[in-house]
């Protein structure tokens, strides 16, 4: 009885205090507080995606490189946040020069609580773009070279193209729409991954030429359950990525965006499963997992302007597309991408961006363009960002390669990067990998 009394008294105090507190705040102040909480919470969800990327990449690669994968995912974020604080934010959201580049707010000069809030939300997106490359260049990249890459993409490559779209730059003025980053984030990471993988070259023994014919050897990942855990973490974090991009904790469209995100991911996983089932004769776990990620990437650009049925179509096409793209890059172009990052983020990011023009509600898009005009602008934006990233990363990775800072030697690769680059074993005491 006494406990119940205390509970009722405590509840009354809380409710009374809450009413008093509410009376002291204006409606605008309450909304500001909700927005602050929502954006910081969403940023924390997106930050958790770093763990998801780390688990996916570790699980889909060989055990002898697990520690190296973890180090890259830890350090590209750590390096990236400092680079984005010092330079990246200013180039992306500083006062625009001709719609091309930001020119002030370096080192967050003059920042207030709103700028700190917005920087926190945006820096985790920059980190996502940077870490995508890790998987495509896994198992043969020098750690020091990777750190330099992470610095440059977070400080300049990602922020400048981001300025064109999210900070009122020239693409935004033309009516280009990318709600949460299919192109701004994912395609930037995907195209950088493609250039890096091409200049880096394949893993030793991946493509073997015998009598003029190339044999493609599969290097199975050492821990599919770990990769699956990573996919679930990424899917969970995507609610911060997409729903968080409403930018307001009082926006009822949070529910709409979360719904389209969920449906697209589910459709992507299902279609990837069936595509792999038809293609390989059995439903492939890694392809199915990449299908879910492909659906998430695909809907990211149009999560707010595409309806639930459209989201299912977008995700389904992305799920089938990712399987075909992975096979084409591997079997035809002989580009060695251990985790399918180019296909998931580059190819499906481009598809999702184009889908805005095909399936999007033009009234919500608000560009004033016709359906054909919107598709054209979306295609232009895809091409412009592709060209920017390819040219800049060619210079970046080409320079690293020229000075011998890009790829480890054959002996180091065969021993595994855990030992050769970091002097540790991720699974000490267990003989669970071969030299190949």
Image: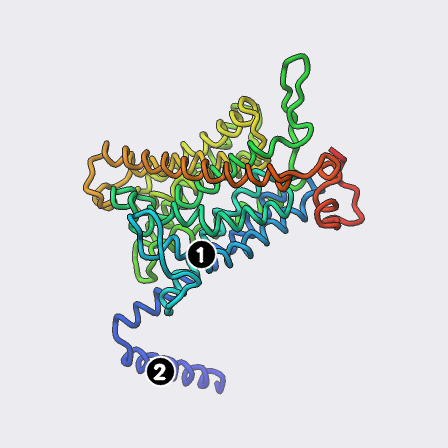
User: At x 60% / y 47%, what residue is drawn?
Assistant: 55
Circle 1 SS class: helix
42 sits to left or right of 151: left
Give the number of callouts: 2
Residue at the extreme front of the image, as rendered: 403
429 sits to left or right of 307: right
Report the disc number at residue 142.
none
Q: Position of residue 369 (x, y in %)?
A: 20, 38
Q: Position of residue 301 (x, y in %)?
A: 36, 43
The answer to whether 25 is drawn above or below residue 238 in the figure is: below
In front: label 2 or label 1: 1
247 sits to left or right of 435: left
Query: Between residues 183 and 59, which one lies in front from this camera angle?
Result: 183
Colour scheme of the rendered structure: rainbow
Q: Position of residue 365 (x, y in %)?
A: 25, 44
Q: Position of residue 231 (x, y in %)?
A: 53, 45
Residue at the extreme bottom of the image, as rendered: 2
Task: Write down the residue under mark 2.
Answer: 17
User: At x 63% / y 48%, what residue is drawn?
Assistant: 144
User: At x 37% / y 66%, what residue is drawn?
Assistant: 36
The answer to whether 353 is drawn above or below residue 237 in the figure is: above
Quarter that holds the C terminus: top right
The answer to whether 238 is drawn above or below residue 377 in the figure is: below
Quadrant of the image occupied by residue 94: bottom left
Task: Write down the residue under mark 1.
Answer: 87
10 Å crowding of disc 1: few (<14), some (14-19), many (20+): many
> Can residue 91 be spotted in the picture?
yes
First-in-chain label (2 vs 1) = 2
Mark 2–mark 1 contact, CB under 8 Å? no
């Amino acid at each position: 009885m006494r406990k119940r009394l205390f509970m009722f008294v405590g509840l009354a105090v809380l409710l009374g205090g809450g009413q008093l507190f509410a009376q002291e705040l204006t409606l605008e102040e309450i909304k500001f507080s909700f927005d602050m909480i929502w954006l910081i919470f969403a940023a924390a969800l997106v930050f958790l995606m770093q763990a998801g990327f780390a688990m996916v990449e570790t699980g889909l690669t060989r055990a002898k490189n697990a520690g190296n994968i973890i180090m890259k995912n830890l350090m590209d974020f750590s390096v990236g946040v400092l680079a984005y604080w010092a330079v990246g934010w200013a180039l992306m959201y500083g006062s625009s020069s001709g719609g091309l580049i930001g020119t002030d707010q370096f080192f967050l000069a003059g920042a207030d609580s709103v700028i700190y809030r917005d920087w926190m939300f945006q820096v985790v997106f920059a980190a996502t773009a940077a870490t995508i490359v890790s998987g495509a260049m896994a198992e043969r990249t020098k750690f020091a070279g990777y750190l330099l890459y992470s610095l440059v993409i977070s400080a300049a490559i990602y922020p400048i193209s981001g300025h064109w779209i999210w900070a009122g730059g020239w693409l935004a003025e033309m009516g280009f729409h990318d709600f949460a980053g299919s192109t701004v984030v994912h395609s930037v990471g995907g195209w950088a991954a493609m250039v890096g993988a091409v200049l880096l070259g394949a893993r030793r023994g991946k493509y073997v030429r015998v009598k003029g014919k190339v044999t493609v050897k599969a290097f199975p990942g050492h821990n599919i359950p770990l990769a699956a855990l990573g996919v679930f973490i990424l899917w969970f974090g995507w609610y911060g990525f997409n729903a968080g991009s409403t930018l307001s904790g009082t926006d009822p469209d949070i529910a709409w965006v979360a719904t389209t995100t969920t449906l697209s991911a589910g459709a992507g996983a299902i279609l990837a499963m069936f595509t792999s089932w038809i293609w390989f004769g059995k439903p492939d776990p890694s392809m199915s997992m990449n299908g879910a990620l492909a659906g998430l990437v695909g809907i990211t650009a149009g999560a707010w302007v595409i309806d639930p049925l459209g989201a299912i179509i977008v995700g389904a096409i992305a799920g089938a597309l990712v399987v075909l793209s992975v096979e084409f890059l591997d079997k035809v172009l002989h580009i060695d991408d251990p985790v399918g990052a180019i296909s998931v983020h580059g190819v499906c990011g481009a598809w999702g961006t184009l889908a805005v023009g095909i399936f999007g509600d033009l009234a919500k898009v608000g560009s004033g363009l016709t359906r054909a005009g919107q598709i054209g602008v979306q295609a232009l934006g895809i091409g412009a960002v592709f060209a920017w990233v390819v040219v800049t990363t060619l210079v970046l990775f080409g320079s690293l390669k020229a000075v011998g800072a890009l790829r480890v030697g054959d002996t180091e690769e065969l021993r595994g990067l855990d030992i050769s680059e970091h002097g540790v074993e991720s699974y000490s005491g267990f003989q669970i990998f071969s030299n190949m």
